Image (cartoon, grey):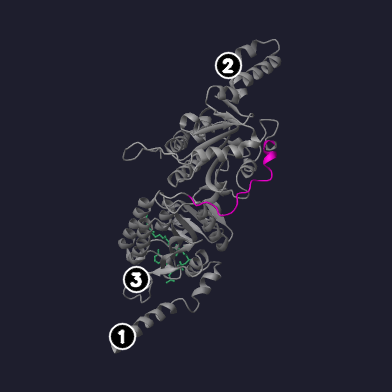
């Protein structure tokens, strides 16, 4: 009895000491920087009272450091009643830097997440490898990266950057499926401004080097960007609502009644009469999917290509669409990479893919060629061809050349290709084709304007229209725009149990 009392005394003493770590100016230090504490973040993200912490009382390797936890809070809980594994780096403890114990704690939740088939969420706020621990911290990162790779395509992995992510701290997020950032407080860089100054003699601010704006628009490293942490964490919850917990499950169905957009009847009015004029493809997406369900991913990067999740009749789908209002919807390097990565994510997690197509071609020019559009464009070809989830394309307007092929065309394995009567499917646009085929006649013609008009008419009637494609089976059906939603619902329902085995091999050699 006496012995027990002693043990309990020690137990409560340790708990109290642990608790004391979070007192004093602990919370204020983070709040002053416009940031929540690691614990507040977890509480905000998880269902109330659902968090169970593990390894809370692990001690840092350095015996002189008499704190608990080693700068990271790890555990599990639920989000909208679905189980998740979570870790949150604590910047107040040694700058959230990663030492051996810190790494072991993260690795433990990574192992649990993969073995139990639950998503894992990392809240990053860290100065990177803990300098004092030398190679042990580098080895710690190596163990985390290896687990990130092993879990890739098995469970959703989400990184939320809520402070610095410096050095090794950037590469685990890079290996996960999605990265969230917050304006002004999140920064990601391999080396910080002081190293940049030292090595390159360049002055650059944190924000310009690796701020949320830079990574969400220029580099494309961040998929989501928010003004504050609370909205960011709500965004994470929203993303998870579309995703299955692992690669075996199907994405959860929404419990709400599926409501179609009120504007479905006006859908074809989105297209301008003049086929060379731009319009916003988002207007078409919003009319097709369940009301207000479209959730755009990488909204500010490669805006000529739209990627996002939505619900169609309550089922999650991934959407890949050309955006005619940005660069006329041409596909460049960034657009190819962005869409290819998204297609592979959807494929890994059983999310059917809808492609909305209006694309005049791949982006021409020296810059794109020298930066290897050939290899980057091939990524999208590869991603669509290898994806075994249900895949449907609707050709809204232009579908020219290689860009027609790449956007999930029939012979790339598209399960259904539908086209609106406004579709123009051809090797190239009218002007370019006529110039190549008829430049001699046009040069010698008495009335070149009249001849050109005739040639344009002939090209449209006999080549660049959806009816020829339909007659030859390259398009399954030319459909009325306002019937597109109903058509897609029935087509995806038909494809629901699609089974397609991948060829047995170690892995393909995607053009990285
Ligand atoms: C140990 C660190 C640390 C680190 C920060 N701290 N980074 N301790 N190892 N990597 C500590 C600081 O000493 C300080 O401790 C506390 O955390 C807060 O840091 P401050 O500098 O006061 O905060 P702030 O001004 O907000 O700047 C944050 C920062 C800066 C931008 C993250 O600390 C920084 O630049 N750190 C180094 C970043 C870096 O270069 N990391 C790369 C490591 S190499 P006290 O006791 O004063 O509170 C790496 C390689 C791995 O990661 C490669 C794998 C592929």
Pick the front one: 168 or 259: 259
219 relative to 273 in the view: left or right:
left
276 relative to 406 in the view: left or right:
right
Question: Pointer 3: residues within 10 angstroms few (<14), some, or many (20+)?
Answer: some
72 relative to 216 in the view: left or right:
left
Q: Position of residue 113 (x, y in %)?
A: 38, 58
Q: CA distance from mark 2 to mark 3?
A: 74 Å
* Whether residue 55 is situated above or below residue 121 in the rendered picture: below
Instruction: Classify mark 3: helix, strand or loop.
Output: loop
Asked if disc 3 is less than 8 Å from ligand 1, the answer is no
| Residue at horizontal 41 percent and vertical 39 percent from the top | 499
Question: Are the residues at dot 1 and dot 3 in contact (C-beta closer than 8 Å)?
Answer: no
Q: Which residue is under mark 3?
A: 60
Q: Which residue is under mark 2?
A: 437
* Whether residue 230 is situated above or below residue 273 in the rendered picture: below
Residue 368 shown in magenta: no
Question: Are the residues at dot 2 and dot 3 in contact (C-beta closer than 8 Å)?
Answer: no
N-terminal-most mark, 1 or 2: 1
Q: Quadrant of ligand 1?
A: bottom left
Question: Are the residues at dot 1 and dot 2 in contact (C-beta closer than 8 Å)?
Answer: no
Pick the front one: 58 or 450: 58
Question: Pointer 1: residues within 10 angstroms few (<14), some, or many (20+)?
Answer: few
What span is colored magenta in the figure?
A: 251-268
Q: Residue furthest left?
A: 3
Q: Which residue is under mark 1?
A: 4
Q: CA distance from mark 1 to mark 2?
A: 94 Å
* Whether residue 406 is situated above or below residue 225 in the rendered picture: above
Dot label at residue 436: none
Q: Position of residue 103 (x, y in %)?
A: 35, 63
Question: Pointer 2: residues within 10 angstroms few (<14), some, or many (20+)?
Answer: few
- Which secondary structure is most common in the magenta stretch? loop
């Amino acid at each position: 009895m006496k012995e027990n009392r002693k043990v309990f005394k020690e137990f409560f003493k340790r708990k109290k000491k642990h608790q004391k770590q979070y007192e004093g100016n602990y919370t204020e230090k983070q709040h002053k920087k416009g940031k929540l504490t690691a614990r507040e973040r977890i509480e905000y993200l998880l269902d109330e009272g659902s968090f169970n912490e593990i390894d809370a009382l692990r001690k840092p390797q350095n015996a002189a450091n008499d704190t608990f936890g080693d700068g990271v809070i790890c555990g599990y809980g639920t989000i909208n009643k679905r189980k998740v594994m979570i870790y949150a780096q604590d910047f107040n403890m040694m700058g959230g830097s990663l030492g051996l114990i810190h790494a072991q704690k993260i690795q433990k939740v990574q192992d649990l997440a993969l073995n139990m088939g639950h998503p894992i969420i990392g809240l990053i706020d860290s100065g990177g490898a803990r300098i004092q621990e030398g190679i042990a911290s580098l080895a710690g990162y190596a163990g985390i990266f290896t687990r990130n790779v092993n879990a890739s395509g098995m469970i959703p992995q989400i990184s939320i950057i809520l402070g610095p992510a410096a050095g090794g701290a950037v590469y685990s997020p890079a290996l996960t499926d999605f990265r969230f950032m917050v304006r002004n407080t999140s920064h990601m860089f391999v080396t910080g401004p002081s190293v940049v100054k030292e090595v390159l003699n360049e002055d650059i601010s944190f924000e310009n080097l690796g701020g949320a704006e830079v990574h969400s628009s220029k580099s494309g490293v961040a998929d989501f960007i928010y003004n504050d942490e609370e909205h960011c964490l709500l965004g994470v919850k929203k993303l998870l609502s579309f995703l299955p917990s692992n690669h075996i499950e199907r994405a959860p169905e929404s419990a709400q009644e599926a409501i179609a957009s009120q504007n479905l009847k006006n859908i074809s009015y989105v297209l301008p009469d003049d086929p060379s004029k731009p319009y916003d493809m988002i207007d078409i997406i919003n009319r097709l999917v369940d009301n207000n369900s479209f959730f755009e991913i990488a909204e500010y990067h490669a805006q000529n290509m739209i990627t996002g999740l939505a619900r169609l009749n309550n089922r999650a789908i991934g959407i890949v669409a050309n955006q005619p209002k940005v660069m006329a919807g041409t596909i460049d390097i960034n657009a190819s990479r962005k869409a290819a990565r998204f297609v592979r994510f959807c494929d890994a997690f059983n999310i059917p893919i809808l492609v909305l197509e209006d694309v005049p071609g791949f982006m021409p020019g020296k810059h794109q060629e020298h930066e290897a559009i050939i290899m980057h464009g091939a990524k999208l070809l590869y991603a669509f061809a290898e994806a075994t989830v249900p895949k449907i394309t609707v050709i809204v307007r232009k579908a020219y050349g290689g860009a027609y092929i790449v956007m999930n065309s029939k012979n790339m394995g598209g399960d259904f290709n539908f086209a609106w009567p406004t579709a123009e499917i051809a090797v190239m646009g009218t002007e370019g084709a006529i110039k190549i085929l008829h430049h001699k006649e046009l040069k010698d013609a008495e009335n070149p304007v009249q001849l050109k008009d005739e040639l344009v008419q002939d090209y449209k009637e006999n080549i660049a229209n959806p009816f020829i494609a339909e007659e030859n089976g390259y398009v399954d059906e030319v459909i009325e725009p306002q019937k597109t939603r109903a058509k897609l619902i029935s087509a995806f329902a038909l494809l629901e149990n699609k089974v397609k085995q991948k060829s047995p091999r170690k892995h393909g050699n995607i053009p990285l």
